Image: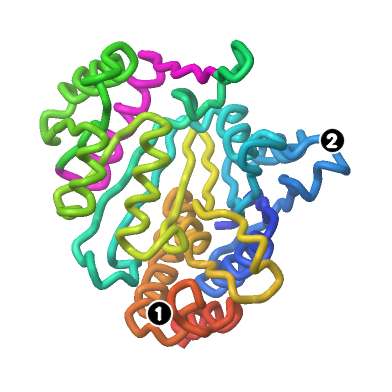
């Protein structure tokens, strides 16, 4: 089946890793018509915004997008394209599977968790203001509507994927109103899924437990900021952000993306690791019902990481982006 998909190459290493992913998808048998649109710092001077209307229009039309990394300045500059995209399209659920099957770390061999992060509110929304000289304020907004929605998504995901346990991660011992409201939603939704064990863990303890015994976690559901932090910790268990896919889901559309940054220092050098975007594309194919394509990609990536012959420098190897991609394609077509 032919699919029309929005492609946002991104900036920095984005165009390199998305181009490599396009090659892999084609080799795996995907039939895709790409609608290529640009976002990020590169289009700011042209359009006066980092997220032109045509990007949103394209995603609304195709219902699915693959996005490369986009630079977000620290402490100044334009608003994060990622945050704006999630808000504008109401992409309320961020899902990051973290598995040692796709990892290169020898420290943790039994990691198989999925982090489900609420994507639209909490302090990560960036609702900030200066309230006096030298005094800044950030608003932490938690609502029942968003908490119910992300809790239900997490339990439905667990049920669909035959997962056994959902942990709600919180700091309700201190933030009794906001995180307490989130927990109340999780507890209510959990009652609708008696076949799935429901547990709760305080976020700082969760971080410690992930380092000590990550195999105890299955599905974790978190508010926005905790989810951002804990998902990067999870990526560290398996070798880094270059080995973790990401997906953002709305009611009837989805954006799949690498969770790492744009790495402008290595852009154009043909040494960027494309695996995070490729794994995100694998998730995209499953979302579109193309399991045979996804399975080809999954098999080739696992073989590559097992044999460790064509790893890019961030993974301890010396291969170029092109050599890594060529090795994956040979595994698929041989």
For marks 2 and 1, the one nearer the N-term is 2
Q: Nearer the viewer, mark 2 or mark 1?
A: 2
Residue 247: x and y in percent read 47, 46
Residue 273: x and y in percent read 53, 69
Q: Is residue 102 above or below residue 112?
A: below
Under circle 1, the secondary element is: helix
Pointer 2 residue? 48
Residue drawn at x 55%, y 57% is: 1
Question: On the picture, is 189 further left or further right than 67?
Answer: left
Residue drawn at x 57%, y 28% is: 87
Q: Is residue 124 above or below residue 104?
A: above
Magenta extent = 137-164
Pointer 1 residue? 304
Residue toward you, 252 or 320? 320
Residue drawn at x 64%, y 59% is: 14
Quadrant assignment, res 94: top left
Question: On the picture, is 113 further left or further right than 129?
Answer: left
């Amino acid at each position: 089946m032919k699919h029309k998909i929005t492609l946002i190459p991104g900036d920095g290493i984005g165009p390199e890793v998305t181009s490599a992913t396009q090659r892999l998808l084609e080799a795996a048998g995907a039939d895709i018509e790409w609608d290529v649109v640009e976002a990020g710092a590169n289009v700011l001077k042209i359009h006066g915004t980092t997220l032109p209307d045509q990007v949103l229009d394209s995603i609304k039309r195709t219902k699915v997008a693959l996005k490369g990394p986009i630079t977000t300045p620290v402490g100044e500059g334009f608003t994060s394209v990622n945050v704006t995209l999630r808000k504008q399209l109401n992409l309320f659920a961020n899902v990051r599977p973290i598995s040692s099957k796709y990892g290169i770390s020898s420290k943790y061999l039994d990691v198989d968790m999925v982090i489900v992060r609420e994507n639209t509110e909490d302090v990560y929304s960036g609702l900030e203001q200066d309230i006096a000289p030298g005094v800044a304020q950030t608003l932490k907004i938690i609502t029942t509507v968003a908490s119910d929605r992300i809790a239900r998504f997490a339990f439905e995901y667990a049920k669909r994927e035959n997962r056994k346990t959902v942990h709600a991660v919180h700091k309700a011992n201190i933030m009794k109103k906001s995180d307490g409201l989130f927990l109340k939603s999780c507890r209510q939704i959990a009652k609708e899924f008696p076949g799935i064990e429901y547990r709760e863990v305080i976020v700082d303890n969760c971080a410690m437990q992930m380092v000590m015994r990550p195999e105890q976690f299955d599905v974790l559901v978190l508010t926005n900021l905790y989810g951002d932090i804990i998902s990067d910790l999870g990526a560290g268990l398996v070798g880094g952000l270059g080995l973790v896919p990401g997906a953002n889901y709305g009611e009837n559309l989805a954006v799949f993306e690498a969770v790492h940054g744009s790495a402008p220092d290595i852009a154009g050098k043909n040494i960027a690791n494309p695996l995070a975007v490729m794994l995100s594309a694998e998730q995209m194919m499953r979302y579109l019902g193309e399991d045979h394509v996804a399975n080809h990609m999954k098999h080739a990536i696992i073989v590559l990481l097992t044999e460790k012959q064509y790893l890019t420098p961030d993974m301890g190897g010396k291969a170029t982006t092109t050599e890594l991609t060529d090795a994956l394609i040979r595994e698929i077509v041989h």
